[in-house]
Amino acid sequence: MQHHTWGLGMRTLKTALAIWLALWICDVLQFENSALAAITAIAAVQPSLKGSMTTIKNQLIATTFGCVLAVVVAYYFHGSYTAIAISAILAIVLCVQLHLRDSIVLLLVTIILIGQTPLENFQLAIVQRISMILIGLFIGFGLNFLIRPQHNHRLQEQIDQLRQEFEQLYRDCVEDLRRPQHMEKEAVQQRVMALRDKIQEVRHTYQLSVDSRLSYDEKTERDDLYLARRTINALASNLERLVEIHRSIVLAPQLDGSEVIRQMVYQYLMEIL
């Protein structure tokens, strides 16, 4: 559909709304440099609800360290470029060690904006900047909570497409039983690798669907996601079986009178499909 082509999905609209709300709230509160709130809101609008919750947790941890570094830079080094650069190095190393890589960009923005805060009205400026970070985080999470990310339709489309491509590859491989010349090995390998990549993509979409449902238990639930998971796993295992079947077909010796046997095996494999 057209909105898939242009990327005009619900997440795009929520991101735009988050930016508008962040800027508007900061304007009502008469905060300066409200861009910090908008940037934080963008980071908080994740493709899943669990992703937004994780982002808030990680950003709060990273922001705490970033604010401490930024305050030191602003108060004791008066926004020195060298001090900001050194603080950025420390912040990156800290994020890497704490497995907060996704928070690095926002943390560096925080250090730069707070680190260059003038000493006049210093405390007020710091409070405003920290408030903007919190506003952005909770706007992004709030929108994701109220308008839950929906991936089920895309997941079903991907599974249907994956099934069709697998079935076509299956037919082509089994047809090698009746061909005098087998399919090129490289061509089959490329199609298998492409299907494996698509299986990983579908698994990712499935995980986004799970992460968008609070308190979802994969071990006990028996719903549409349960069926989707079983279908994905079945296609993945059957693809590996198909690779072995085709290898056996290619390596099977061409013996006199084997045409009847090949036809019987062909019919059997097609009935399995």
Image: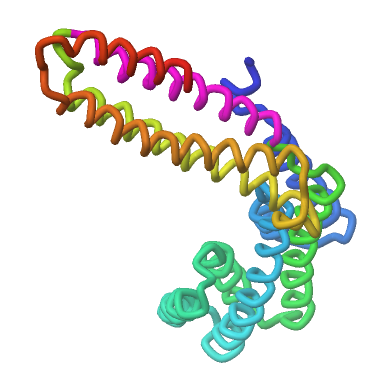
Characterize the magenta stretch by its predominant secondary structure.
Answer: helix
Image location (x, y in percent) of residue 39? 65, 54
Magenta span contains residue 158: yes
In-image side of 230 versus 240 (left or right):
right
Image location (x, y in percent) of residue 137? 74, 61
Q: Residue at x 40, y 32 (%)?
A: 195
Image location (x, y in percent) of residue 61? 65, 77
Q: Residue at x 46, y 80 (%)?
A: 97
Q: Which quadrant of the figure contains the N terminus? A: top right
Q: Is residue 241 above or below residue 26?
A: above
Residue that lies at the very extreme toward the bottom in this rendered image: 76
Q: Nearer the viewer, residue 28 or 52?
A: 52
Query: Can you see residue 3?
Result: yes
In-image side of 255 versus 226 (left or right):
left
Q: Residue at x 25, y 9 (%)?
A: 260
Magenta span contains residue 216: no
